[in-house]
Amino acid sequence: MNVFLIGDSIRYGADANPDYQTSDSPGYGIYVKEMLEGKATVYAPDENCRFLEYTLRYLFDWTKDIDCEKIDVVHWNNGLWDVLRINGDEPLTPIPIYTYYLKRVYGMLKKIFPNARIIFALSTAVVEEWADPVFFRYNSDIEKYNEAAKEVMNELGAEINDLYAITSKFHSSLHCDWVHFGKEGSKILANAVVEKILNK
């Protein structure tokens, strides 16, 4: 099996520390690779995939050295950058634009990976009381964007991995900051990702 992971810093890690064993925020991606060792080859961009428009722009760059026809599963998320409110402004990507780009990215994924199952992961919950008020995300916004994403993915026939349902129940000790997760939180997410990839 060959797997391609796309995602923001929840996948990639927040501090981009090459030694994930000492990282405060390793992201779930590295643990997915470990858990699937011997079962699947895991590919992923060596960067934070950020918001939807950024992902659409760089998909070609991230996949040009991969035999994309041999990818069996794409596990993908975008959303936390899209809901970001800076200096009290509206979310970076309005919901109609978010759903528009979800469809475009999905279409590009189907074109690039013609034989792959597409799994879309819902955005994870945040600890609002720890947040910087000028760089803010509301869980209520995340829930609205996740609902919009579910509608789009159901329409397109993509699978959904509800990481929000998991993280909304997390104790704050599983976070390393208001958005990101420490090792244990990242491992829990990785397990959920692996289970979905293996279709358990």
Image: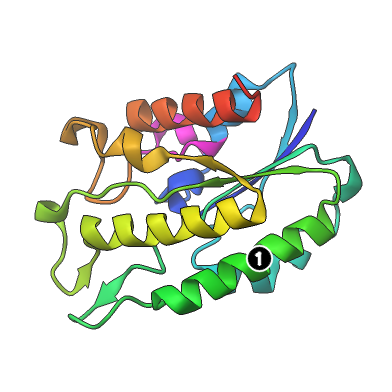
Residue in front for this viewpoint, 5 or 33: 5
**Residue 19 in the figure: left or right of residue 135:** right
Q: Quadrant of residue 169?
A: top left
**Structural crowding at the residue carrying mark 1, measured as other residues with C-alpha within 10 Å and reported as few (<14), some (14–19) or many (≥20):** many
Please determine whether, in this image, residue 179 is positioned above or below residue 181: below
**Residue 196 in the figure: left or right of residue 176:** right
> Residue 142: x, y in percent?
31, 58
> Residue 25: x, y in percent?
37, 41
Residue 100 visible from this viewpoint:
yes
**Magenta stretch: helix, strand or loop mostly:** loop
The residue positioned 34% from the left and 33% from the top of the image is 166
Image quadrant in which the N terminus is located: top right
Please determine whether, in this image, residue 147 is positioned above or below residue 70: below
Which segment is the magenta one?
19-29
Q: How is the image coloured?
A: rainbow
The residue positioned 40% from the left and 51% from the top of the image is 123
Instruction: Name the residue furthest front.
Output: 155
**Residue 120 in the figure: left or right of residue 9:** right
Q: Residue type at mark 1?
A: Val
The residue positioned 29% from the left and 51% from the top of the image is 179
Image quadrant in which the C terminus is located: top right
Please determine whether, in this image, residue 9 is positioned above or below residue 31: below
> Residue 42: x, y in percent?
71, 35
**Residue 27 belongs to the span the image colors magenta:** yes
Q: Secondary structure at mark 1?
A: helix
Residue 47 visible from this viewpoint:
no
Instruction: Name the residue furthest left.
Output: 129
Q: Which residue is mark 1?
A: 105
The residue positioned 63% from the left and 67% from the top of the image is 103
**Residue 125 belongs to the span the image colors magenta:** no
